[in-house]
Image: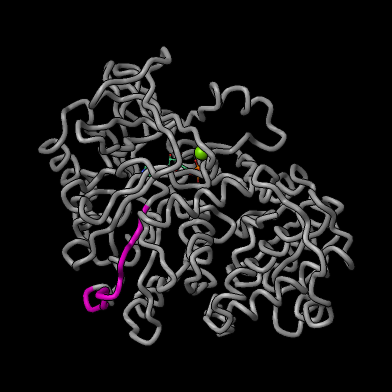
Amino acid sequence: PVRYYDWIAHFGRRTPDKIAVIDLASQRRLSYAEFDQRISRLASHLRDQLGVKRGDRVAVLALNTTDTLEVQFACFRIGAVFLPLNNRLTVPELQFIVGDASPSVMIHDTDLAEVALTVAKLCNVASALLFGPGASYEAAIAAAKPLDTHESVTLDDISTIMYTSGTTGQPKGAIITHGMTFWNCVNLGGPAYISPSTVLLTVLPLFHTGGLNCYTNPVLHSGGTVLIMRAFDPGLALQLISDVSAGINQFFGVPSIYQFMAQHPSFATADFSRLVIGGVGGAPMPVPLLKVWEERGVALQQGYGMTETSPAVLTLDKEDAVRKAGSSGKPVMHTEVRIVRPDGSDAGVDELGELWVRGPNVTPGYWNRPDANASSFTDGWLHTGDATRVDAEGFYYIVDRWKDMYISGGENVYPAEVENVLHQIPAIAEAAVIGIPNEQWGEVGMAIVAVRPGHTLAAEQIHAHCAANLARFKCPRLIEFVDALPRNATGKIHKPTLRNKFGVSKA
Ligand code: ATP
Ligand code: MG
């Protein structure tokens, strides 16, 4: 049978000497043939020594490393389920996820040994292999024989359980099938200009769909090269992108990644001339930040997706990036989208509704979550929870999450629109807006703002700027200054934390 999941074996034969992955922290460079060999040996070790069977979950708790990718592909080869864990979570948070997904083994990083061993013990999971030079992972690969047989895995089999970012509440385990990952590679290939010549710098965490599938897996599916950064460092990222010998021509980040790079001292002199694409998605992208990058000659291309859609749903083409700045573009090839009114009918042009998605890249459901499964789907359409509109030319605009919208004096306010206006103020490093209960207006907006180091900013200046640029009901009435905004491991602003902290009206 065709092995849809085995891109590495394919390129191990087709372009054996080509570099597949580079681990920046350890400086390990693996050709496709070497990568394929290591995956094959790891797969046989998992199956024959650790007793991992088809359908068993294999957890990984690590900072970004090429080893994590080997575990993914090894799981695919034996029909096991890859379970990447968020390395920023605390023991109780991990205990929830590991208890929920019940892996049979856990593989972890030396730096995270204490947390990993505690969680493994609490959840009764065998902690099996340890990443790192001289550690058991390397010994296992060295001692193992290449895998002799292959499981016949179909496109509908589960390949991965990936937990959502937990931006709106508890993370949910999205079931990812081999087909979903495969179709995402197909869907993104063209729009993200992925080819065998692609050299991608991956800075987002590999336990999140952004790091793994934008564009790490699709680039490996095309026989390109991926450089893995252990943890995002804006200065190092700018240095690598500028480095001719590294040859990086592709990059993907969430908005905060671009924000931190733009605020770094070497942004002004960095060389972006080799970048074919700078993709951005995962959270609302402030249009003023797009402009900052455009002034440096980089037309960032927004895309929209979610863990549950593996992830690409919408992408903006390079030709439209400036003219349609703020749009997430148009649907990728093998997916269907609708914008739906609360009564279930289709919204018209420019009318705001909820985005629904259907297609082979969409999850069949959440792991152990009958409640979420019942409320999230209608006839195979996944309800994204995102307020969206489409213009007359067919370009989609993700406005904000429905749940983050608040109603002030009877008018709907989408925080992302207000945040866009706040980001026009150069002294603002980060800004978030939430709705706060208020007796007179129902709710009023509160802006929580972090000021750039070396700048000063008074609340009156923020009020004045908003008054000049926003309708009265959208202007935040309350302003709080903080040193930094709370973010989850994906770099998204964590609004539940802000609501807990500031959720009582002072107006
Ligand atoms: P959780 O579902 O656990 O609350 P999450 O929704 O942040 O977390 P992800 O799957 O990582 O988990 O993120 C998907 C969400 O990210 C989308 O539903 C949407 O709200 C947001 N998003 C993604 N791309 C964009 C974009 N281009 N513009 C605005 N929002 C985006
Ligand atoms: Mg979500």
**Image coords of residue 214 (percent x, y):** 46, 57
Position of 118 relative to 250 (above/below): above
Front-most of 87 and 144? 144
The residue lying at 20 percent from left, 46 percent from top is: 324
Quadrant of the displayed image that contains ligand 1: top left
In the rendered view, tell whether residue 438 sits above or below residue 382: above
- Per the image, is 109 magenta? no
Name the outermost residue toward the bottom: 245
The N terminus: image quadrant? bottom right
Q: Magenta stretch?
A: 268-280
Instruction: Quadrant for the C terminus, please.
Output: top left
Residue 394 percent location from the top left of the image: 25, 35
Q: Is residue 442 left or right of residue 110?
A: left
Residue closer to the observer: 194 or 406: 194
Q: Residue at the spot x=29%, y=28% of the render?
A: 413
**Predominant secondary structure in magenta?**
loop
**Residue 391 visible from this viewpoint:** yes
The image shows residue 160, relative to residue 36, as above or below, that is above
